[in-house]
Amino acid sequence: MKYKFISDSHTHSENSFDGKDSVIMMAERAYQLGLYSITVTDHCECHELGERDYHKDIQASVRDVTKAAALYHDRVRIFKGIELGQPTQNPLASDDALSIADFDFVLGSLHNLKNEQDFYFLNYTQDNYRNYLDRYFKELLELAQTDCFDSLAHLTYPFRYIAANPKIVFDSQAYAGQIDRILMTLVQNNRALEVNTSGLRQMIGTTLPDESVVKRFRELGGKYVTIGSDAHRWGDVGAGIEDGLRMLLRCGFTHFTVYEKREPQMLPIL
């Protein structure tokens, strides 16, 4: 294996509403692949707190990760994470979720606009997709300005659904200015940018964000980058991570970041 410290910092177990497999199965897959570390970042969709018992889900995730970490302590590092979805839509819920445990790592995500469905479920047309994206990047900037997360997840999340619609003529460069403002905010606040490799398994065929955005983050002074598969089943653990590391090298990064006890650990790519 070319890369010594291959790490997957975005995975979901059965303790996420859309996860399929146990933490032990995810950990075993990481061990079989020879990963240096895996972080389990089960969902907490903050805007739904009250509609769904996320306390129970998060507590179960923490319990299962703690057990797995003890079992695999001499084979693969396993970190406690959480993915905060839409924390700016319900800051009290975000604070409440983070109080449940001493997490190693917190992802900040925006899966849906306020009072809208997940971007996965929206019906995109040539006439409406720009409105969705303008609102998305405005709300994502608000998230980037908070201090509730360590790494901003899948910055171009809606792209993977819009780009999958062959009827839409889509120009991602039209949003370069809005993306720059988000990247500069991350740099100023010493936050990380996530390279999410799930897009490599989907029709869009690129990481989220893609190489041009990651390179721009570097140009603007970005230091911290995390990398994750966004696996929701054991078979996708580690998927695309080596591709992501190669891309980081092309963008000028020599290190990537894994968080432990909310502190960035800089690991050499080579």
Image (cartoon, helix red, strand yellow):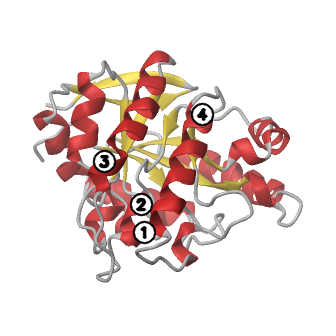
Answer whether residue 108 is visible to the viewer in this image.
no
State which quadrant residue 7 falls in: top left
Along the line of sight, the residue nearer the viewer: 135 or 16: 135
Provide residue 34's location: percent of width, then percent of height: 26, 50
Which residue corresponds to the image point at 45% horizontal and 78% vertical from the top-left?
A: 125
The residues bearing labels 3 and 2 have C-alpha atoms spaced at a distance of 10 Å
Could you tell me which secondary element the residue under label 1 belongs to?
helix
Q: Earlier in the sequence, mark 4 or mark 1?
A: 4
- Contact flag, marks 2 and 1 (Cβ < 8 Å): yes
Residue for badge 2: 28
Could you tell me which secondary element the residue under label 3 belongs to?
loop
Up the image or down, 186 lies above or below 214; here it is above
Q: Earlier in the sequence, mark 4 or mark 3?
A: 3
Kind of residue at disc 4: Phe
Kind of residue at disc 2: Glu
Kind of residue at disc 3: Leu
Q: Nearer the viewer, mark 2 or mark 1?
A: 1
Q: Is residue 70 left or right of residue 175?
A: right
Answer whether residue 216 is visible to the viewer in this image.
yes
Residue for badge 3: 35
Residue for badge 4: 149
Which residue corresponds to the image point at 16% horizontal and 40% vertical from the top-left?
A: 3
Q: Earlier in the sequence, mark 2 or mark 4?
A: 2
Up the image or down, 158 lies above or below 68; here it is below
Residue for badge 1: 234
